[in-house]
Image: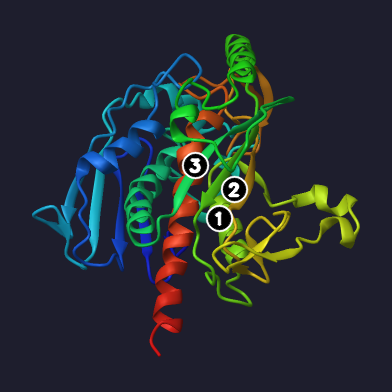
Amino acid sequence: MGNTFGHFFRITTFGESHGGGIGVVIDGCPPRLEISATEIQAELDRRRPGQSKITTPRKEADSCEILSGVFEGKTLGTPIALLVRNQDTRSQDYDEMAEKFRPSHADATYEAKYGIRNWQGGGRSSARETIGRVAAGAIAKKILSQVAGVEIVGYVKRIKDLEGVVDPATVTLEQVEANIVRCPDPDCAHRMIELIDQVRREGDSIGGVVECVARNVPKGLGVPVFDKLEADLAKGVMSLPASKGFEIGSGFAGTLLTGSEHNDEFYIDDAGEIRTVTNRSGGIQGGIANGEAIIIRVAFKPTATIRKEQRTVTATGEETTLAAKGRHDPCVLPRAVPMVEAMMALVLCDHLLRHQGQCRVL
């Protein structure tokens, strides 16, 4: 019912922000893959709250427990269940939101759809749901790296109108993790941090763009016509909380070019492989990976829950105002980076297994 993603490598996430915990069940993971809670934890630590002054102050260790599917450090080929228990909940901060709908949040729409909602921390609509995605993404990354040498690096490209200069071909995880905003352009990162902190002190929020590159992706991934690779990537990242836009390659800027300006001309490299001179296609043509780097961008809106007073209505239809309490990110972008990487990894891993299942049999 909307909680499962993928075909051959399939995940189902569960849990609410202030419930007992958040988790994921992974089905279709190949057997004998060496994986540990430590490897998964490294990705969760990049996503967890309380990292710095520009993220939510909620203090959660987000410690990962492997409940099934792994024995003596290796996957069994059976369902893998991962769990992170909630600890630092302050449900009383949301008492007012039991009746008042937060502007631009999921409160009103969840109420309209289900006739009931968990108003504590946003329940299922909270970004804490992404814990399961990031945990599963860590396993997908391991498969992609081990089987095909795929490397996935995400980073903050833009915060409001501040845009970093980053080369997707050479950017490294170390450069991304060198500062708390996860922008590998040091000068721009400094200005971004100052802007986010200023907005935080004002009780407001801002948005921006995460860019993500996948390098060494095997040719042939993607299943036309409805499961084109970019279509599944779009669905994956657009299912993330606060996401509002998706681009691949030249994106919307490509509409300003002519065909002769936009086309990626072919050539044969020293290894005898077909390559493209440019990469405006973003690594995918006709819905199928062409062997070049896959480059996507995801736009995230400003965090909906802010301390500034705004007009709203109650569940009983009365007009009122709300100045939200609680602990919230003034900008979701720094913590969204591992989320985007995870969705990229989940899609690519799923398509790698699908491709091998269909095209490597005969």
Q: Nearer the viewer, residue 271 or 54?
A: 271
Please give the residue where the numbered disc 1 appears in the rendered image: 113
Q: Position of residue 139 (x, y in %)?
A: 32, 53
Sequence-first tag of 3 and 2: 2
Q: Residues within 10 Å of mark 3 (few under 14, many from 20)?
A: many
| Mark nearer the viewer, 3 or 1 | 3
Please give the residue where the numbered disc 3 appears in the rendered image: 153
Q: Is 110 displayed left or right of 19 in the figure? A: right
| Mark nearer the viewer, 3 or 2 | 3
Question: Callout 3: helix, strand or loop?
Answer: strand
On screen, residue 336 above or below 262: above
Q: Is 361 displayed left or right of 319 in the figure? A: left
Please give the residue where the numbered disc 2 appears in the rendered image: 109
Q: Can residue 20 be seen from the camera position used here?
A: no
Q: Nearer the viewer, residue 260 or 70?
A: 260
Dot label at residue 90: none
Location of the N terminus (image quadrant): bottom left
Give the spatial CA distance, label 2 vs label 1.
6 Å
Q: Position of residue 191 (x, y in %)?
A: 64, 14
* Residue type for callout 3: Val
Q: Is 269 displayed left or right of 340 in the figure? A: right
Query: Are the residues at dot 2 and dot 1 in contact (C-beta closer than 8 Å)?
Result: yes
* Residue type for callout 1: Lys
